[in-house]
């Protein structure tokens, strides 16, 4: 499963198409294509998306090896992973010069 995650991350490397590019995908805002899922192309534009793709690859390997104790389709696995993904929600910070609120 660790190898599946590492292979997924390696497959997102921009160096596959440009030998002078970075080894790791851009985790900021530069689009890349994820070959982890060969059914369709997926725009990878953030660290969260890279993490999701690696998590799905690892979970798929666990399903394939029979250690996940589920038999989800690839589509259901993706849906469940997307639904379970944590998304931070931050309160707005208001500065109070007097420190009273």
Image (cartoon, rainbow, N blue to C red):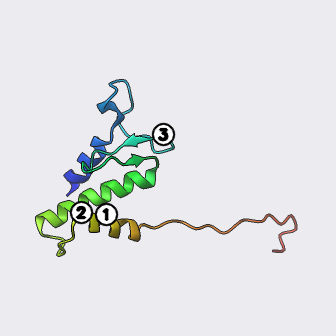
* Residue farthest toward the left in the current orientation of the protein: 65
| Residue 75 relative to residue 61: left or right | right
Q: Residue 78 carries which label?
A: 1
CA distance separating discs 1 and 3: 23 Å
Along the line of sight, the residue nearer the viewer: 78 or 62: 78
Q: How many numbered marks have been drawn onto this rendered protein structure? A: 3
Residue 10 drawn at (x, y percent): 28, 42
Quadrant location of residue 73?
bottom left
* Residue farthest toward the front in the current orientation of the protein: 40
CA distance separating discs 1 and 2: 6 Å
| Residue 30 relative to residue 15: left or right | right
Q: Work out which quarter of the rendered image holds the C terminus and state it.
A: bottom right
- Sequence-earlier tag: 3 or 2: 3
* Image marks 1 and 2: residues in contact by CB distance under 8 Å: yes
Q: Work out which quarter of the rendered image holds the N terminus and state it.
A: bottom left
Name the residue at 29% across, 49% down. Answer: 40
Name the residue at 88% across, 68% down. Answer: 98
Residue annotated with mark 3 = 30
Along the line of sight, the residue nearer the viewer: 82 or 10: 82
| Residue 10 relative to residue 3: left or right | right
CA distance separating discs 3 and 2: 26 Å
* Residue farthest toward the top in the current orientation of the protein: 20
Residue annotated with mark 2 = 74
Name the residue at 40% across, 70% down. Answer: 83
């Amino acid at each position: 499963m660790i190898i599946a995650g590492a292979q997924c991350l390696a497959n997102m490397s921009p160096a596959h198409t440009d030998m002078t590019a970075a080894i790791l995908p851009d985790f900021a805002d530069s689009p890349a294509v994820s070959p982890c899922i060969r059914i369709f192309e997926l725009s990878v534009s953030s660290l969260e998306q890279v993490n999701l793709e690696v998590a799905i690859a690892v979970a798929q390997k666990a399903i394939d090896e029979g250690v996940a104790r589920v038999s989800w389709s690839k589509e259901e696995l993706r849906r469940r992973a997307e639904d379970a993904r944590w998304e931070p929600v931050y309160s707005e910070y208001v500065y109070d010069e007097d420190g009273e609120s």
